Image: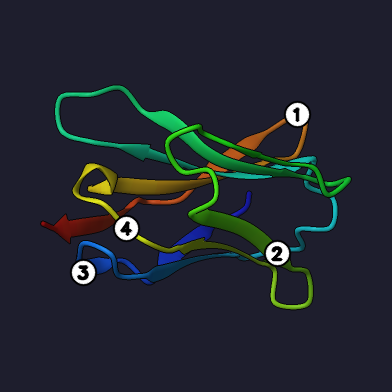
Amino acid sequence: QVQLVESGGGLVQAGGSLRLSCTASGTILSANAMAWYRQAPGRQRELVAKLTSGGRQTYADSVKDRFTISRDNARATVYLQMDRLKAADTAVYYCNFDYGNNDYWGQGIQVAVSS
């Protein structure tokens, strides 16, 4: 069982930046992929960014060139750097680690962008 703890959310003005962190209770070296999802009120959860064990990055079109996903193996942490934030980015953000046979979710963290 892997526990994921997210941090770094909050309220920011449009055009500002936030960095989300997701720290695992165990190693992330064996994870096939790590990802960030988000869910806005009344909408389905959507993939924001994904990073595979091979280093491939995938982004939703709505966040390309504004968000960056990265990892720190020594800290067992994956990050989501969010720049030039928009009101449309307001949502609860969730991290997800895929270990193949199992995948794990963080508890979710609120990001609110004021226009």
| Residue that mark 1 sits on | 101
Q: Quadrant of the C terminus?
A: bottom left
Q: Residues within 10 Å of mark 3 (few under 14, many from 20)?
A: some
Q: Amino acid at mark 4?
A: Leu
| Residue that mark 2 sits on | 71
For this orientation, the residue located farthest to the right is 54
Q: Amino acid at mark 3?
A: Val
Who is closer to the viewer here, 91 or 60?
A: 60
- Are the residues tagged 4 and 2 within 8 Å (C-beta)? no
- Which comes before the other along the chain, label 1 or label 3? 3
Distance between the Cα atoms at labels 1 and 3? 37 Å
User: Percent x, y for residue 33?
Assistant: 73, 41
Distance between the Cα atoms at labels 4 and 2? 21 Å
Q: Nearer the viewer, mark 4 or mark 1?
A: 4
- Are the residues tagged 3 and 4 within 8 Å (C-beta)? yes
Q: Amino acid at mark 2?
A: Arg
Res. 85 mark: 4
- Which comes before the other along the chain, label 2 or label 1? 2
Q: Nearer the viewer, mark 3 or mark 4?
A: 4
